[in-house]
Image: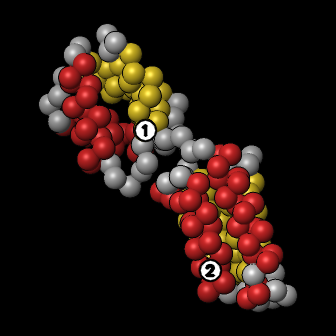
Amino acid sequence: MPTFDTVLESDLVKIKNAVENTAKEINTRFDFKGTPAAIELKEKDKEIILTGDSDFQLQQISDVLRNKLTKAGVDIRFLDVGKVEKIGGDKVKQVTKVRDGIDTEQGKKIQQLIKGSKIKVQAAIQDGKVRVTGAKRDDLQAAMALIRAEISDLPLSFDNFRD
C-alpha cells in the first residue's frame, strides 16, 4: 500500500553555522561594541539564546540571524520565538526554540484535515511524523497538495514515499 511521511525536520548544521556567523558579526559590529550582546545555540535543547541590553538590540540580533538563516536556505518558520525576559540589571534575553518534529497538536490538526477532505487516505501520528496511507498514488498526491495548501505556518516536508 502506498505511503508517505509528513515531517518537520530542520537542518541543525545550517542553523549552527548561521548562529556562528551571527556571533561573528555581533563581535565585529561597531554598534554592539561594549555591550553584552551575544547569541548562543544549545544543540541538546535545540534552543537559540539571544542576550542584549534592550528589546531593540535583541531585535537587531534577531534580524541578523534571520538574514544568515535565509542565506543558508533555512526556512525561518522553524523558529519559535519566545518572550523577552529580564535577567538582572539592564540585561534582557530571549529564547528561540528550533522546531523539530510534529507535536501532537499539529499532528491532530493534519489528521483532522485529511479526514475532513474525503480523500480516501488514512493518517496516523507516529513519534514526530504523520504517516499517510492510501490505496492510490493519486490520492496521496492530493493529500500532499491539501496539506501544503492548508498548513502554511509550518515548513512541512514529505519523505519516505513508497509505492
Q: Position of residue 11 (x, y in %)?
A: 60, 44
Q: Nearer the viewer, residue 64 or 105?
A: 64
Tag 2: residue type?
Gln
- Judged from this view, the residue extending furthest toward the left is 118
Location of residue 86 (image quadrant):
bottom right
Q: Is residue 10 left or right of residue 151?
A: right
Q: The N terminus lies in which quarter of the figure? A: top left
Q: Residues within 10 Å of mark 2 (few under 14, many from 20)?
A: some
Q: Position of residue 127 (x, y in %)?
A: 52, 30
Q: Is residue 88 at least partly visible in the picture? A: no
Q: Residue at x 34, y 53 (%)?
A: 152
Indicate the secondary structure of the residue bearing disc 1: strand
Which residue is labeled 2 in the image? Answer: 60
Q: Nearer the viewer, residue 59 or 73?
A: 73
Q: Position of residue 80 (x, y in %)?
A: 54, 60
Q: Is residue 127 at least partly visible in the picture? A: yes
Q: Residue at x 29, y 41 (%)?
A: 147
Q: Nearer the viewer, residue 71 or 92?
A: 71
- Where 120 sits versus 86, above or below? above
Q: Residue at x 25, y 28 (%)?
A: 141
Tag 1: residue type?
Ser
Q: Residue at x 75, y 81 (%)?
A: 29
Question: In 3D space, how far apart are the residues under numbered discs 1 and 2 (Cα atoms)?
Answer: 30 Å
Which residue is labeled 1 in the image? Answer: 157
- Where 51 sits versus 106, above or below? below
Location of residue 79 (image quadrant):
bottom right
